[in-house]
Image (cartoon, rainbow, N blue to C red):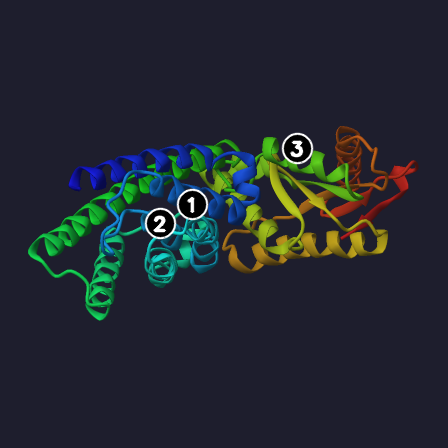
Amino acid sequence: MYYISFTHACTLIALSYIALKLKNRLFMERYETLSASLLTGLACIIIMLQPFPTDGLVTDLRFAPIVMAGLRFGPIVSLLSTLLPSFYIIQIGEVHGFVRIAQELILPAIVSSLFHRKENESGYAMIPFIDGIKVCVMLAAIRFIIQTYMKLDFSLLAIASHLITLVLSILAVLVLIVMYNDDNRSWILQRRFELQANQDGLTGLPNLRSFMSIAQNTIRQRPLSIMMIDIDNFKYYNDTYGHLQGDLLLCEVGQLLRTTIHESDYAARYGGEEFIIMSHTVDTDRLKQYALQLCDTIARHHSQVRSDSAVITISIGISVAFGYQDELLRVISEADEALYVSKREGKNRFTIYSDDIPFTANNA
């Protein structure tokens, strides 16, 4: 009898390992609620297919996948996970079928969901071991109360069987939590590497690689505008105050752009003292107000917070892509040409690209 429970634990761990390997697949991430519920339900059924003594209400480990679903995803996924195994129990006509559905499926879904932490949904939080232990102890206590109410076997052998099942349940759930947390650490580490690869190390803004990928996908779907931004007289500032102060200035300007741009827009560091913005604003009048706001924000901020006499301003070049077939590189090149006009015409201003670009410079 005891070796059967041990077999169930090994089966459960093997199934969980397979599920962890599958969860990073595209369809798993896109349809997480459905896929997690389906895999959890199938795991319960596979455990029920293992040999099991039918006397009394001694439990197998069919509830363990439900417990993990509750801890990881919360009540919706854990309750959905009970549908497949419940239907299976009804179909095979298992002894005490409806009691088992309530005791081994629905109850674990509810109890484990009580210990669900919202941050687990983001994938950046670990499941505490103590939560798994509490769930197993609570379920064991409830099973004992149910058995007492139904006046089933209270022999020493039956009690020992329940205790052994409790210990195996705790060990199995703890192993599952270890596996999940270890896989989660790998996932977090991978995301950090991806972030580093797509982030400018100095300013903390996305780098050009990340920007080009997002802008390329966006320009295929909707009109957009590109803003090329350059810090005026940056070389002089760098030579006068030193490279360290120059780096601090780049960080300041980068953070100001990040907090000033529209929520749906995307700012990145282009390279050197240049930044680039992808905006969903394409109306010319609104773009003028937008660019003017950016220029004023930078100039006003540095005139208020800097003790030195340096005047920090920016120049902006803007190009608009109205057609879905516009080439991103061409739009960026046009914005760069407009930026050159802004620099040539006196700096601290913006220019919107057009065929007669020398006449489109606007004082900020």
Callout 3: helix, strand or loop?
Answer: helix
Residue found at x 88% / y 38%: 358
Callout 2: helix, strand or loop?
Answer: helix
**Kind of residue at disc 2:** Met
Q: Residue furthest left?
A: 156
Tell me how far mark 3 sits from mark 1, CA to CA.
Answer: 39 Å
Residue found at x 62% / y 58%: 300
What number is the disc on residue 212?
3
Res 63 seen here: yes
Residue found at x 42% / y 58%: 118
The N terminus - image quarter: top left
Q: Is residue 13 left or right of residue 212?
A: left
**Kind of residue at disc 3:** Met
- Local packing at callout 1 (Cα closer than 10 Å; few below 14, some 14-19, many 20+) is many
Residue found at x 61% / y 33%: 208
CB of mark 1 within 8 Å of CB of mark 2?
A: yes
Callout 1: helix, strand or loop?
Answer: helix
Q: Is residue 40 left or right of residue 175?
A: right
Q: Nearer the viewer, mark 2 or mark 3?
A: 2
Using the rendered view, name the quadrant where residue 110 is placed: bottom left
Tell me how far mark 2 sits from mark 3, CA to CA.
Answer: 39 Å
- Local packing at callout 3 (Cα closer than 10 Å; few below 14, some 14-19, many 20+) is some
**Kind of residue at disc 1:** Thr
**Disc 2 marks which residue?**
68
Considering only order in the chain, which callout, 3 or 2, is on the residue closer to the N terminus? 2
Considering only order in the chain, which callout, 2 or 1, is on the residue closer to the N terminus? 1
**Disc 1 marks which residue?**
40
Tell me how far mark 1 sits from mark 2, CA to CA.
Answer: 9 Å
Res 201 seen here: no
Give the percent coordinates (x, y) of residue 58.
22, 53
Give the percent coordinates (x, y) of residue 75.
44, 60
Give the percent coordinates (x, y) of residue 149.
23, 70
